[in-house]
């Protein structure tokens, strides 16, 4: 466990962040407060990874809507 003072942390931020990838690093303030720095584990997700929506629309309904938008022609099912 490595403990830095606020001033040391301010001067060595890159070093502290690199060290925090491997172990917990502490920064102690003059007031006696101690802060912990660690690498946050994040789950990599795609912005296209969205939850599905239940609907009563059929494949035909969706294709008709797309065709209508593309061609500007109302579907025969309207």
Image: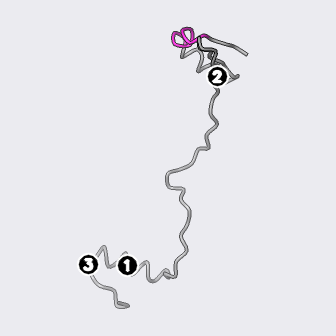
Number of dots carrying numbers: 3
Q: Pointer 3: residues within 10 angstroms few (<14), some, or many (20+)?
A: few
Does residue 20 appear to the left or right of 50 in the view shown?
right
Label for residue 76?
Answer: none
Secondary structure under badge 1?
Answer: helix
Whichever of callouts 3 and 2 sits on the residue coming sooner in the sequence is 2
- Spatial CA distance of label 3 from label 2 is 57 Å
Residue 43 highlighted magenta (yes or no):
no
Nearest to the observer: residue 52 or residue 24: 24
Q: Read off the residue under disc 2.
A: 20
Residue that protrudes farthest toward the left in the picture? 72
Residue that protrudes farthest toward the front in the picture? 31
Residue 7 highlighted magenta (yes or no):
yes
Q: Is residue 58 above or below residue 29?
A: below
Secondary structure under badge 2?
Answer: helix
Q: Read off the residue under disc 1.
A: 65
Does residue 21 appear to the left or right of 52 in the view shown?
right
Q: Quadrant of residue 25?
A: top right
Residue 6 screen position, x and y as percent: 56, 12
- Spatial CA distance of label 2 from label 1 is 52 Å
Range of magenta residues: 5-12
- Spatial CA distance of label 3 from label 1 is 10 Å
Residue 3 screen position, x and y as percent: 67, 13
- At x 32% / y 79%, what residue is drawn? 68
């Amino acid at each position: 466990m490595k403990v830095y003072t606020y001033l040391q942390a301010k001067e060595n931020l890159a070093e502290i962040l690199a060290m925090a990838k491997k172990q917990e690093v502490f920064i102690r303030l003059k007031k006696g407060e101690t802060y912990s720095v660690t690498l946050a584990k994040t789950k990599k997700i795609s912005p296209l990874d969205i939850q599905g929506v239940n609907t009563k629309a059929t494949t035909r309904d969706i294709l008709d809507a797309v065709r209508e938008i593309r061609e500007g022609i109302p579907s025969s099912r309207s």
